[in-house]
Amino acid sequence: MYLIYRRLDELRSIMSADSSTTVDLFDRFDAWAAGLADRDPLAWRDALPTAIGEPPVAAEHPALIRALDRVRQHARIEGTALPWLGLPFALRDIGLTATPLPCLAGGAKAFRLKRKPDVGDWLATVRAVEAAARDGLERLHDLERFHRDAQRAIVAQFRPGALPRLLALAVHQPLLSPQAVAHHLGLSVAGASKLLERAVTAELLVEITQRRSWRLFLPHDLAVEFGYAASKRGRPAKEPPALPASRALVDTFDTFDREMAEIDKLLSGIVQVPSASD
């Protein structure tokens, strides 16, 4: 989910800069987030204006251009940047992705303003999609690295306690406060604070505030990206080797995966970007 939340913030900047209207640019984010989780592949498409379609000449163009053209047609009808949210679904429908990927939402101002965008407009948009895909892939690598580091930290703990649940929560909701952790995991605020400090000691989370109340924590990769922590210089550290296979470790990892599934169910009703106090 944190990929979705991160992309929401990016889209706010894009759409605010690309808007010339006074409509609420963000009133469809709830439906968008719900659509990303909807298993019905036709749900989002059925909600589009019926005027959107593919002319016969579309077959002569690459699949990516066809997907972008669907967004262009919607933008011409809508008159706003809200159709940018439909690109992940168009890419899925055309067969370029297996599922809608929120990191690939976007578009170009020319789609909304020009009846026929020129070659430069199409090239800039394709390059923007490429950059977003690379950025999303890097975020996915960071997320997978956090999962592996969390497994090692859990195994290294003599008594993990609620640490697996906290790390599972961090995967879905990376900005954490003691109040939020206490609310979601059923702990006292004091207990949640101690649990967060354990995660900091294990170098899985970084405290981004220096105050006694309303403390906030982020995974290390996000803390670096938002400027709350310094990136490590020099060659990237070599990742520790995989832990040796054993029944005890398999049970531990299965438990962690179950915790992630339970946290996912717990947060499945949250479609807006959560605040630290949620």
Image (cartoon, rainbow, N blue to C red):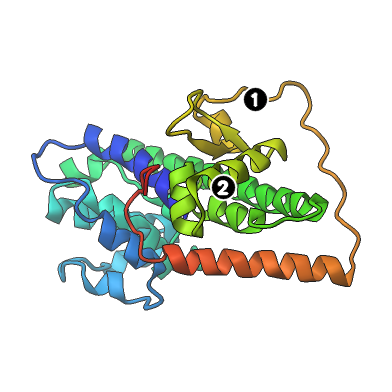
Percent from the top left, x then y, of residue 51?
Answer: 15, 67
Disc ID at residue 231: 1
Q: Position of 252 compared to 162: left or right?
A: right
| Nearest to the observer: residue 199 or residue 222 | 199
| Nearest to the observer: residue 21 or residue 65 | 21
Q: Amino acid at mark 2?
A: Gly
Percent from the top left, x then y, of residue 23?
Answer: 10, 45
Q: Please state which of the two labelled residues, at mark 2 or mark 1, is closer to the viewer.
A: 2
Is residue 176 visible to us here?
no
Q: Marks 2 and 1, how far apart in space?
A: 30 Å
Residue drawn at x 51%, y 46% is 174
| Nearest to the observer: residue 261 or residue 66 | 261
Q: Amino acid at mark 1?
A: Ser
Residue drawn at x 38%, y 67% is 59
Residue drawn at x 42%, y 54% is 102
Q: Secondary structure at mark 2?
A: helix
Q: Can you say whether 20 is above or below 150 in the image?
A: above
State which tag comes first along the sequence, 2 or 1.
2
Disc 2 designates what residue? Answer: 191
